[in-house]
Image (cartoon, rainbow, N blue to C red):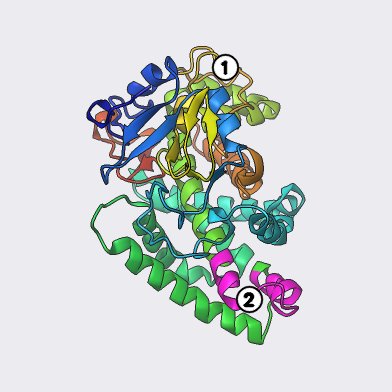
C-alpha cells in the first residue's frame, strides 16, 4: 500500500504494447489496492483485481457524482450538476432516470432494431466494396454503424452524425488545460436543446419523442434533464462502440482461423464477442469514483473524499479469473468480463453494442474473407490520449 506521495506511481499508466494493458497492472494485482498520482497531482486509490473491482462497483460508499470533493476528474467536461444525466448520479435519482430510458435500450428493444442495423451494415459493405484499396474501415464502417444507429433510434437527423462524432472525440480526449471539451459540450448540448424543443412542440415516433410524451409532458422530466439524458445516450451510444468495432476487426484479421470457426458455427459468436470485450476493455481511464463515507477496498481502509479509479483492463486480464489473459481465446468463458461495468451502473447500452457487433463482424468477414491490413501493423496509430481506447485509422485491403 502506498503511504507517501513521493512513491505513488503516476496514473494513467503507459502501454508498452498497444494490444495489451499497461505492464504495471500485473504488478498492481499482486498487492492490495494502492494509491496513484493523478494528472493534477492529487492521489487516488487504484483497484485492479477482478474481485476487488467487481465489489467496488457495487459499493454504495463510492459515488459517481463528479461534483463531490475529491472526485478524480478525467473527462474534459466541467463538473456541472446533472450535465451527464444519470451517468454521474447516485441512487435514488440515478435509479429513477435510468428506468425511463432502459425500456428503449434493453434486450427486447434491441431485437426490434436488429433488422435496421442489418440493412445499414449491408449498405455500408456495398460502399466499402466500391472504394479503391486500401479502405479505412473506421470512417467507412466502424463509425457509421453505431453513429447512424443511435441517430435513428433517437430521431437525430443522420446528416448531423459527423457533427456529434467530432464533438464526442473532443469530450473524451484527455488534454489537460484545453478548452476543447467545454466547447464541445456547449456545442452539442446547444444542438440537442434546439432539437428537443422542436420535438416537445411536435413529438415524433422515436426515442426522444417517446421520452417527451411519457415523461416531459407529465412533468416527471424537465427540459434540462431531458437534454442531459439524450446527450448521455448519444455520446455513450456510439463512441465506445466505434472503438470496440475497430479493435475487434483488427483482432480478427490477426486470427483468421478464429474467423473461419466463427463463420462456420454462428453459435460461437457470443463467445467471440465476450472475449473481444474482455481482451480490449476499452474504457481505459474513465471508471472513477469518490468515497462518501469510510469503507474498505480489498481490505484497505478508504476515507471520505478520497478518489478511486477502477483499472478495468487490469481486472479483465486477471489470471486468477482468465487463464493466459494476454492471449485472445474465444473458446474461453469470458462472460465475467467487466467491460460494461457491473451493478447499478452497468452500461445501459450494452445490449445494443453487442447486437451491433453480432451483425457487423460476421457480415464484414463473409463479404471480404481475405480481409487483411492495408499497412504494416507498426504503422497503425492507437488512441492513447482518450478515456476510450481505440485506433485513429484501420486501413484494410482484400
Pinpoint residue 171: horizontal percent, then vertical percent.
38, 58
Question: Relative to 80, is 314 above or below?
Answer: above
**Mark carried by residue 84:** none
Q: Where the C terminus falls, by quadrant?
A: top left
Residue at figure coordinates x 74%, y 76% from the top left:
213
The prevailing secondary structure element of the residues shown in magenta is helix
Pinpoint residue 32: horizontal percent, then vertical percent.
45, 20
Q: Where the N terminus falls, by quadrant?
A: top left
Residue at figure coordinates x 70%, y 55% from the top left:
102
Residue 110 in magenta stretch? no
Pinpoint residue 185: horizontal percent, then vertical percent.
40, 66
Asked whether the viewer can see residue 73, the reply is: yes
Earlier along the polypeptide chain: callout 2 or callout 1? 2
Q: Residues within 10 Å of mark 2 (few under 14, many from 20)?
A: few
Camera-side residue: 242 or 309? 309
Question: Relative to 325, is 149 above or below?
Answer: below
In this picture, which residue range is highlighted in magenta?
A: 208-229
Q: Secondary structure at mark 2?
A: loop
- Which residue carries the number 1 mark? 321
Asked whether the viewer can see residue 123, the reply is: no
Residue 228 in magenta stretch? yes
Pointer 2 with pointer 1, Cβ within 8 A? no
Camera-side residue: 20 or 58? 58
- Which residue carries the number 2 mark? 222
Q: Secondary structure at mark 1?
A: loop
Image quarter for residue 306?
Answer: top left
Residue at figure coordinates x 65%, y 39% from the top left:
343
Amino acid at each position: 500500500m502506498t503511504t507517501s506521495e513521493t512513491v505513488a506511481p503516476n496514473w494513467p499508466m503507459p502501454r508498452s504494447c498497444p494490444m495489451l494493458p499497461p505492464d504495471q497492472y500485473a504488478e498492481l494485482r499482486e498487492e492490495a489496492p494502492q494509491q496513484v498520482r493523478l494528472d493534477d497531482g492529487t492521489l487516488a486509490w487504484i483497484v485492479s483485481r477482478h474481485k476487488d473491482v467487481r465489489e467496488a462497483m457495487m459499493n454504495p460508499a463510492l459515488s459517481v457524482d463528479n461534483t463531490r470533493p475529491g472526485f478524480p476528474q478525467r473527462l474534459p467536461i466541467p463538473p456541472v450538476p446533472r450535465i451527464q444525466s444519470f451517468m454521474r448520479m447516485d441512487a435514488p435519482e440515478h435509479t429513477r432516470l435510468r428506468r425511463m430510458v432502459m425500456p428503449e435500450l434493453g434486450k427486447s428493444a434491441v431485437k426490434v432494431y436488429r433488422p435496421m442495423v442489418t440493412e445499414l451494415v449491408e449498405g455500408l459493405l456495398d460502399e466499402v466494396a466500391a472504394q479503391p484499396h486500401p479502405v479505412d474501415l473506421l470512417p467507412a464502417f466502424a463509425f457509421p454503424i453505431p453513429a447512424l444507429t443511435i441517430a435513428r433510434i433517437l430521431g437525430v437527423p443522420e446528416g448531423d452524425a459527423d457533427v456529434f462524432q467530432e464533438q464526442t472525440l473532443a469530450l473524451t480526449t484527455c488534454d489537460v488545460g484545453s478548452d476543447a471539451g467545454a466547447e464541445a459540450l456547449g456545442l452539442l448540448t446547444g444542438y440537442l436543446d434546439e432539437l428537443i424543443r422542436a420535438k416537445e412542440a411536435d413529438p415524433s415516433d422515436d426515442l426522444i419523442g417517446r421520452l417527451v410524451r411519457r415523461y416531459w409532458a407529465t412533468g416527471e422530466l424537465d427540459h434540462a434533464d431531458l437534454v442531459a439524458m439524450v446527450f448521455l445516450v448519444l455520446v455513450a451510444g456510439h463512441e465506445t462502440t466505434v472503438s470496440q468495432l475497430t479493435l475487434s476487426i483488427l483482432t480478427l484479421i490477426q486470427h483468421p482461423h478464429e474467423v473461419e470457426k466463427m463463420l462456420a458455427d454462428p453459435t460461437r459468436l457470443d463467445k467471440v464477442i465476450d472475449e473481444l470485450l474482455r481482451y480490449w476493455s476499452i474504457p481505459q481511464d474513465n471508471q472513477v469514483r469518490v468515497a462518501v463515507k469510510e469503507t474498505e477496498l480489498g481490505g484497505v481502509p478508504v476515507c471520505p473524499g478520497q478518489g478511486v479509479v477502477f483499472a478495468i483492463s487490469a481486472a479483465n486480464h486477471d489470471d486468477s479469473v482468465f487463464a493466459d489473459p494476454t492471449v485472445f481465446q474465444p473458446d474461453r468463458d469470458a462472460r465475467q468480463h467487466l467491460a460494461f461495468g457491473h451493478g447499478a451502473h452497468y452500461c445501459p447500452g450494452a445490449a445494443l453494442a453487442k447486437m451491433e457487433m453480432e451483425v457487423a463482424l460476421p457480415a464484414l468477414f463473409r463479404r471480404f474473407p481475405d480481409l487483411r491490413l492495408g499497412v504494416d501493423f507498426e504503422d497503425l496509430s492507437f488512441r492513447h490520449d482518450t478515456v476510450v481506447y481505440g485506433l485513429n485509422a484501420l486501413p484494410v485491403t482484400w
